[in-house]
Image (cartoon, rainbow, N blue to C red):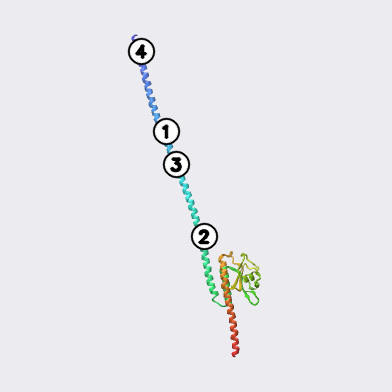
Amino acid sequence: MTDEDRKDLFQRADEFLGLFRRGAEFTRQLLEENERLRRRLMAVEDRQNFAAQDTDEWEKLRQELLDRIRGLETEREDVLQRIRALEEENRQFADRYVEIEEENNNLANLYVSSYQLHSTLDLSEVLKIIIEIVINLIGGEVFAVYVLDEKTRSLEPVASEGAAIRRFPRAELGSGVVGMAVESGETACGEPVPSDDFARPIVCIPLRVEERPIGAIAIFRLLAQKEGFTPLDHELFTLLAGHAATAICAAQLHGQSERKLNTIQGFIDLLTK
């Protein structure tokens, strides 16, 4: 082998070693780049995992908040329903309070009126007080007070309100609405429809002292603000029937005694002259 051949061989060996070194360097760079890319990939995957975990946490928190909101809305609705129920109870209590106040006022007025009824023995005054009671406590607009004539057994109108007394016909005991109510002693009460038939009242209150018929109060029309009869009205019918009957009976007896007394006094005066 000549020197020229050796030189050429060494030159090729150097070229191969250089090429090998460049290949090794390139391989090292590739490995480094691969490691760098692997680390970046892992970082991205970690961020994705964290983001996924963070999303799950937010979704869980959002769901908890939604559940809490729904729970609060349910509680709010329950509270509103309870408030509405309490308001309804308060309204009922207020209405009942007004009714009780009205009942107390009516009973107080009836007490005062009954006291007035029994404070006089003048029949005309007694009839005026009865008319005021029927207007103010019962709400009658058109009505008449009947008194029984024991001789003829007929019921004569002796006082009236809302119409002239001559428009109210007399009634026979046991006949018609008024006569049957007085005979039975039971209040006749129908629908509160205004009636122009003065033989058929919407309510007839018989006036009796024990079993003795005295007369009746026949109502044909109520005041405009009076829509109908309440349970309190029926109690007033009973109380008024007793007090009015007693007052009329006492006034009649007083009138009869006064007339007899005047007759006896006149007879005595005649004898002593």
Q: Disc count in the image?
A: 4
**Picture layout, residue 50 above or below residue 238:** above
Mark 2 vs mark 1, CA separation in Å: 69 Å
Kindly identify which residue carries mark 4: 9
Mark 4 vs mark 3, CA separation in Å: 74 Å
Q: Residue 245, percent across and down?
A: 58, 73
What label sits on residue 232 in the rendered view?
A: none
Q: Is residue 9 visible?
A: yes
Q: Quadrant of residue 133?
A: bottom right
Looking at the image, do the residues carrying marks 2 and 3 touch, with CB atoms under 8 Å apart?
no
First along the sequence among labels 2 and 1: 1
Label 2 crowd (10 A; few <14 / some 14-19 / many >=20) = few
Asked whether, in this view, residue 6 is left or right of residue 143, the answer is: left
Asked whether, in this view, residue 248 is left or right of residue 53, the answer is: right
**Picture layout, residue 28 above or below residue 11:** below
**Picture layout, residue 180 above or below residue 28:** below
Q: Residue 187, percent across and down?
A: 60, 68
First along the sequence among labels 1 and 4: 4
Kindly identify which residue carries mark 2: 92
Kindly identify which residue carries mark 1: 45
Kindly identify which residue carries mark 3: 60
Q: Is residue 160 visible?
A: no
Label 3 crowd (10 A; few <14 / some 14-19 / many >=20) = few
Q: What kind of residue is marked 4? A: Leu
Q: Quadrant of the C terminus?
A: bottom right
First along the sequence among labels 2 and 4: 4
Query: Viewer-nearest of labels 3 and 1?
Result: 3
Looking at the image, do the residues carrying marks 4 and 3 touch, with CB atoms under 8 Å apart?
no
